[in-house]
């Protein structure tokens, strides 16, 4: 009698059934081992040189290029300064963009407190900027100083070459004590944009009251402690008379019930041209005349 053949084990049956699935896995393991051997055998610079064409080919595909650069929160920092710090442009390879270096460059700019930079393989670069809150520029003893609402100097990280465009966007206050009292005056001017658009600087007088210097050279004298009512009153007058566009030198509002205006002196008439002479023998004739007294600036008082 023949003895029955022994039955294969469960492990043998499982391996036999899964042989088709194991073949690709074994192939991948062999391929990974070969790659590791090449990596260990070839020096790193030589390996980088060999794979450089493949990398350039991948970077050259349109799917891996910068498609847009979005910047948020930049009010005082110019677009030119931001793009210089990013050192990237639309169309450049997105993998060439160094996020860490861009963040460091942006943080080093004046007015920027902190920043976040995000790079997406889809091509978008997002930049979120938080700037320091300078409220005004204070001119004091020949120096221009950035101040906040409390009148304190805004830290500038030691930067001396501030962006001139950013300075132009901030109100200018001048004189002793101007930094500590600027916020209330600037807030009132913000409520009257027509008046604010004519103002170039606010000058603190004896640390008691304010003068407003206008773009055309005129000066508005505000009353002590009553700046807000005076500015609102000036806005109402200007709306009906266009006073701030008239040729005036001084607008005195220190008295609550009276507005004193000093106009500019009239321009002197041009000197008449000398008539052509008949020759060397002829002498010019002088007609005696009386000199006209120079007119002093007129002052106009108006009661409300």
Image: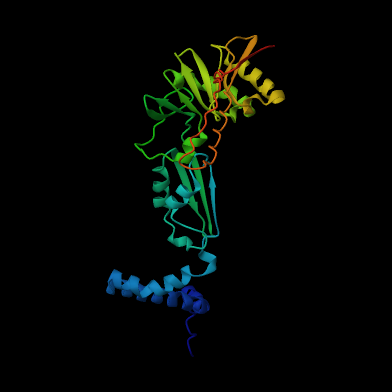
Tell me what residue is drawn at x 49 percent, y 45 percent. 78
Q: Does 78 appear above or below 246? A: below
Give the camera-side residue of 104 and 242: 242
Give the camera-side residue of 51 and 111: 111
Give the camera-side residue of 209 and 266: 266
Residue 267 spot, x, y in % from top left: 57, 28
Tell me what residue is drawn at x 48 percent, y 61 percent. 94
Residue 92 spot, x, y in % from top left: 48, 62
Q: Does 24 appear above or below 88? A: below
Q: Is residue 23 left or right of residue 244?
A: left
Q: Residue furthest bottom?
A: 1
Task: Say how the picture is coloured.
Answer: rainbow
Residue 55 spot, x, y in % from top left: 42, 70
Quadrant for the C terminus in the image: top right
Give the camera-side residue of 270 and 131: 270
Judge whether residue 131 can be spotted in this image.
Answer: no
Residue 101 spot, x, y in % from top left: 39, 51
Q: Is residue 270 left or right of residue 23?
A: right
Tell me what residue is drawn at x 67 percent, y 24 percent. 238
Q: Does 238 appear above or below 42? A: above
Q: Residue furthest front?
A: 281
Judge whether residue 259 can be spotted in this image.
Answer: yes
Q: Residue furthest right?
A: 240
Q: Does 291 appear above or below 116? A: above
Looking at the rendered structure, the number of numbered marks drawn on it comes to 0
């Amino acid at each position: 009698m023949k003895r029955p053949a022994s039955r294969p084990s469960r492990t043998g049956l499982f391996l036999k059934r899964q042989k088709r699935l194991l073949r690709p896995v074994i192939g991948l393991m062999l391929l990974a081992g070969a790659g590791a051997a090449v990596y260990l055998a070839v020096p790193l610079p030589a390996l980088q040189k060999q794979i450089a064409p493949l990398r350039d080919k991948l970077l050259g595909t349109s799917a891996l290029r910068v498609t847009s650069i979005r910047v948020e929160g930049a009010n005082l920092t110019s677009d030119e300064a931001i793009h210089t710090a990013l050192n990237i442009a639309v169309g450049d390879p997105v993998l060439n963009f160094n996020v860490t270096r861009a963040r460091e460059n942006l943080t080093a700019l004046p007015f920027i407190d902190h920043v976040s930079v995000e790079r997406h393989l889809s091509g978008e670069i997002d930049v979120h900027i938080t700037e320091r809150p300078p409220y005004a520029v204070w001119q004091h003893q020949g120096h221009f100083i950035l101040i906040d609402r409390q009148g304190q100097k805004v830290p500038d990280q030691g930067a001396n070459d501030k962006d001139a465009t950013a300075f132009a966007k901030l109100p200018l206050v001048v004189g002793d004590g101007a930094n500590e009292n600027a916020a209330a005056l600037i807030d009132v001017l913000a409520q009257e944009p027509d008046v604010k658009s004519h103002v170039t600087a606010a000058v603190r007088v004896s640390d008691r009251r304010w003068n407003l210097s206008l773009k055309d050279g005129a000066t508005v004298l505000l009353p002590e402690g009553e700046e807000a009512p005076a500015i609102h009153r000036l806005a109402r007058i200007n709306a009906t008379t266009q006073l701030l566009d008239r040729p005036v030198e001084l607008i005195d509002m220190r008295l609550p019930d009276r507005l004193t205006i000093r106009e500019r002196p009239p321009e002197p008439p041009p000197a008449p041209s000398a008539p052509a002479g008949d020759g060397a023998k002829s002498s010019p004739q002088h007609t005696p005349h009386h000199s006209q007294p120079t007119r002093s600036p007129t002052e106009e008082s108006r009661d409300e």
